[in-house]
Image (cartoon, helix red, strand yellow):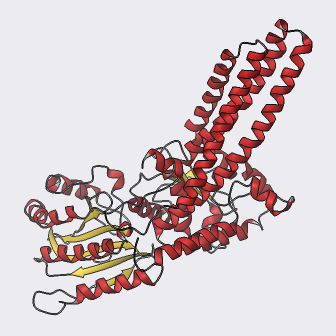
Amino acid sequence: MGFLDTLFGRTKPVPPKLDDLFALPSAAITLQAATGFEPTGSGSVCFRGVEGKTFSDIQDDVRELLNMDAGKPGGGLPVEVTKDSYGFTWLVSSRMSDELDALVTDLHAVNTSLVDNGFGPQLLCTLVAFRDAAERRLALVYLYKRGTFYPFAPLTGERRDNALELQIKGAIGDDLKFEQDLTKWFPVWGAPGL
Amino acid sequence: MARTRYAPDRGLTVRMTVTMFLLGLVFVAFVALIIGIMIAAHASGAAIVLVALVFGGGSAIASLFYSDKIALAAAGARVVSPQEAPELHGIVDRLCALADMDKPRVAIAPTNMPNAFATGRNSKNSVLCVTQGLLDSRLNLTKEELEGVLAHELSHVAHKDVQVMTVASLLAIVAGLLVRFAFYSELFGGGRRNNNQNAFPIILAIMLVSVVVYAVSFLLIRVLSRYRELAADRSGALLTGQPSALASALVKVSNSMSRIPSQDLRAAEAMNAFYFAPAMKLTGGGKSLSTVFSTHPSLERRLAELEKIQKQLGQMTPQ
């Protein structure tokens, strides 16, 4: 925030950074080679809904757009919409596990339609789920406001596997723009699609 | 540049600018008057002004530097870890990620009065504190409403309100010190060079000027505080996208505030300016007078402003 904004108590809503998301498919290949984690084909976009009909109309449009090719060959399952206990909305898109490109395109469609309608600052994060042979869960979380990724590996209960997360950072830290500030690796317990 | 629904409130900016300008003007006029009086009386003013600036500035910097510790100690609050208060931390985590700001420490104060405050000299050292009463099930605050309150407090951190208000009150502190030093120097120093007939009206003039300056700057600081509350309401509501959740939280907190025993309220009075809702209501003197002296805008005013934001967010096409 600039000096004048501080002086006048104005917060400019932070616009989301969208482009770095497209680095994900190639990083996933590196991840699989280095650690054995494979994409599950499920990914989600998390945003803070705005009260009022305008926003819910846009949300419905996005869902319709993503569901257009559902059921057709090459299309995924219908998009799932859930609201978590914090009041945030998650749009979950499920594809085949080898369709990470299509998944990222889906996620990007959600982003652009929110941004085009002026709701870009409401975007929180995107989650892409991975799993390894031992059924360990891992998510790569993309923070829209910072344009950075971080790993989130939930264990049973509200604990996370910090060792695995740091290992992931070591494995693909050069392929993705990783969040260097560890205090920003906030947990997303019970995130849908994980 | 992408279109936005989050236009700043120009009216508020203008009013805040005018207030801060007047505050600066009062201070400059005050210093000029004091120096003028001293020159007229052939007293050496430069050293006194310097000493007052050093003392006033020093105490303000100290209170700014320790503001988080002082506030936590005054409220008897304790910093809690994510394990102790997972829900609270979860909300703050998300809000900070949404606003792209550093996460403040989170503390809980064992007070039954539902309220919250944020303090600290910068974003790294800030503390967001809620009272036990705010989390109490009897208040029946929903998660969205709690989020609204926390977003309001995070906006105070983002707007650096502790720093701004410290600087604003620094002017008053220095002014007060100047008066005192001037008084003593006239009494013990300058008085010797002048005859006693001359010294008395000078001291009287200085005291008169100081009283006027103090009253004016006091009122201006209160005006500024109210504007900054409105600004925090606005930023908080835009951050969560739920202005009506913040509005209903305000109503709930304000309603329960009037039922709280007065001992708690008196203990909380000193920290009034940092609170989410005023802990101490001025009684008597009529509505207009309490509005002028209050650190917080009236509930009606805050609700009306939130309603405007609601309309702004709901419009069909962004500006």
Q: Residue at x 84, y 22 (%)?
A: B203
Does the rendering let one see residue B225?
A: yes
Residue at 78% from the left image edge and 32% from the top image edge: B210
Across and down, in percent, residue B4 comes to 39, 67
- Is residue B266 shown left or right of residue A168? right
Q: In which quarter of the image is the C terminus of chain A?
A: bottom left
Quarter of the rendering containing residue B57: top right
Residue B47, x across and y down, in percent? 66, 15
In the depicted structure, whether residue A138 falls above or below residue A71: above
Residue B222, horizontal then vertical, whole percent = 69, 50
Nearest the eye: B153 or B314? B314
Quarter of image, res A147: bottom left
Q: In this view, does A119 lie to the left or right of B221?
A: left
Q: Work out whether residue B68 can be spotted.
A: no
Observer-nearest of B63 and A163: B63
The residue closer to the viewer here, A141 or B207, is: B207
Name the residue located 36 percent from the left edge and 60 percent from the top edge: A186
Is residue B58 placed above or below B315 in the rendered structure? above
